[in-house]
Image (cartoon, rainbow, N blue to C red):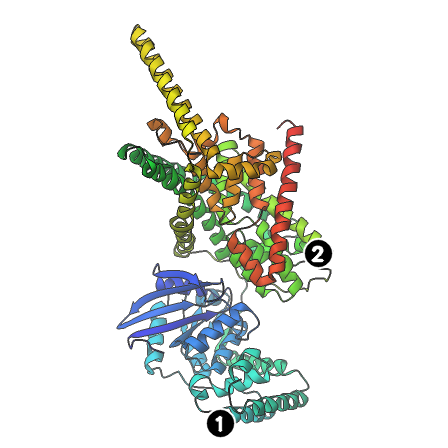
Amino acid sequence: MSRKKNEILIGLVGNPNCGKTTIFNALTGARQKVANWSGVTVEKREGRLRHGDYRIRVIDLPGTYSLTSYSIEEMITRAFILDEQPDVIVNVVDAGNLERNLYLTTQLISIGARTVIALNMYDEARGKGIQVDSMRLGTLLGMPVVPTVGTRGTGVGELLDAVVRVYEGADKTTRRIHIPFGADAEAEIRKIRDMILENSGVAERYRPRWLALRLLEGDTDVAARIRSLPNRAGIEAQVSKSRALIERAFKDPIDTVFSDARYGFISGALHETVEKTAITRTDLSDSIDIVLTNRYLGFPILFLFLWLLFHLTFTLGEYPMNLIEHLVASLAASADSMFPPGPFKDLLVNGIIGGVGGVVVFLPNILILFMGISFMEDTGYMARAAFIMDRIMHTIGLHGKSFIPLIMGFGCNVPAIMATRALENRQDRILTILINPFMSCSARLPLYILFAGVFFRGHAGTVILSIYAAGIAFAFLSARLHRRLFFRNKSAPFVMELPPYRVPTLQATALHMWDRASQYIRKMGGIILAFSVIIWALGTYPRSPEIEQRFQERSAKIAAEFESRQAAARGTDELASLKSAHAAAEEELFRDRSAREKEYSAIGRIGKAVHAVLEPLGFTWQMGVSLLTGFVAKEVVVSTMGVLYHAPTGGSRDAAERSLQESLSRLEYRITPLAAYVFMLFVLMYVPCVATIAAIGREAGWRWAVFSIVYQLAFAWTVSFIVYRAGLLLGL
């Protein structure tokens, strides 16, 4: 690999819930960036730091239990180790669950990676009465073992020192060891290894013994990697012969033979190095779970937590939201007074500031929502939520494991759909993908906050929670329908790991919030800005000379009438009243003119075309246009409204400073609370964004992607029509 001599590339690997992210945050702090792995929409987290004379780059690999090639996480982690050839692997293990965590370590030993073990959550293990001789354990494993407490940064300096020693080849603990698989198996492994070594260059890239092991276990990825070897046919023949011999000798499938040997090695190492003392106190996590995962109390408590989350998202977010709204309005007013009337001023004030500003005000709410989700994940409660939902998920033919991608959908549907790869059954995977868009992603939240704040002030948190709850209900209803029509096989049972409860760190929560906020800000500077300009252009052109002339005549008439009354006015009170009436008449004229020009423009014509379909739902043509642009990204719904409903250029300074919330509430737009609620429901249900459709196409096939578009549009219209008409009958 072409890397500088003073640069070390670290791959951070570990089981889920081992505290890997806390170690990553402790190592890199805020010096992180988030992207996607090439070819997949799984997050790639990378951080940088300096330690001594070295610049260190840390790649946080997806949490995985093994290095096979069955799930996307396993494939990404193994491909990184084999193809990127990191200088050192830091294997984070949970000190309180060593037997399970060290299974991944044995596979790192087999693959030949230079490794340092971070024995994490060491304080919790000692609290449980577990004493680990880390020096002795490191000697047996052939790699340094460093006790750490990631949440407090304890042991991080020692961990980096060990990484440097391993990189420089100066660590006395590091040595190459083999996991013994028994005399019969070892003889067959050697035969395959020797045949692989007949090919020049293979040993420089891969460890031949590991290739032999993976070929015996039927690894298709490794089989593809040796396909170009001249003696491939002979190797494959020997693999088949050796596999049959080993299975006959041990009377077990070869996967079982090898996993038993690895666990036997782990058991022996732990017997030599781990001492358990008697503990009299009850485990705190078990005590909490008696209440939070109770058969009868679990679901009401989960619902209460979700209600609090959405209520706080709105109530706490209202204060910084009002501040940002005031700043955006001041910016619009400054631009309005700074530039002369014309297309550029119109674009700047109504297009860019009106569109992007209409979305940026909701940044605090996004931060609070993700702070709450981060808190639930870091404390370990999110896994309990999936466990609680398992019984309910079985009613639609799925299980609790499918609930995890659905929960992820509250953040973004795209990685949530990718997460369905962890489901073993294809029918379960496709069904989970099809109902995932009903999980209301964070991109829809600005629209909910906007409409709930304008039309349901005082009950906004409850209204928003009802939308999220409706999404879950619609997902369940659709799942039952799809299961009955397309997926008749029963889902497979599963076992879910419940990590211990932990107190999240402020640093981890802040970094999680910043990750999401930075993505939101990048969208505002990219797609939302671009579409705000496009919507402004479509809403401005073509212009009508007839409308322009008609309103100039009306404006001249209003001015002449004011001048004549002003000349005849008696007293300052009458004059002030005349000026107020004149300003109101001008304001009304500008609003009327803007409405006529928007209707004549390209976007008005598009809106009128779709209005016939959406009018039975109580939507205005502006709402229809917002829904069309929302197909690109759901944040664009609000930015489109910011352009279409914003005060027109040329009005008074008060008009330029008017917020989108104030504009929406004006009577001339004819948006009732019932129509506003139905609109939120429609945004929840109708066709997801382009990125989500692309993810469905890649994961389930384009036939299902097209089906998802048609089904969700039909479902959204039908449900919205029923709710709106029922509301009218009830006099709402």
Q: Is residue 286 visible?
A: no
Q: Image height check: is 377 above or below 260? A: above
- For disc 2, the neighbor class at 10 Å (few under 14, some 14 to 19, many from 20) is some
Residue 13 screen position, x and y as percent: 46, 70
Residue at x-position 67% and y-position 58%: 398
Residue 255 screen position, x and y as percent: 61, 80
Dot placed on the residue nearer the N-terminal end, 1 or 2: 1
**Label drawn at residue 198:** 1
Quarter of the view holding residue 680: top right
- For disc 1, the neighbor class at 10 Å (few under 14, some 14 to 19, many from 20) is few
On the rendered structure, is 551 left or right of 340?
A: right
Residue 690 screen position, x and y as percent: 52, 53
Q: Is residue 490 visible?
A: yes
Quarter of the view holding residue 112: bottom left
Give the camera-side residue of 135 and 458.
Answer: 458
Residue at x-position 58% and y-position 42%: 682
Give the camera-side residue of 115 and 548.
Answer: 548
Residue at x-position 40% and y-position 31%: 647
Q: Which three-letter amino acid code belongs to the residue tagged 1?
A: Glu
Q: Which three-letter amino acid code belongs to the residue tagged 2?
A: Arg
Looking at the rendered image, the quarter that the C terminus falls into is top right
Give the camera-side residue of 54 and 720.
Answer: 720
The alpha-carbon separation of the residues under discs 1 and 2 comes to 53 Å
Say which residue label 2 marks: 483
Residue 383 screen position, x and y as percent: 56, 58
Quarter of the view holding residue 138: bottom left
**Label drawn at residue 666:** none
Q: Circle 1 — which element?
A: loop
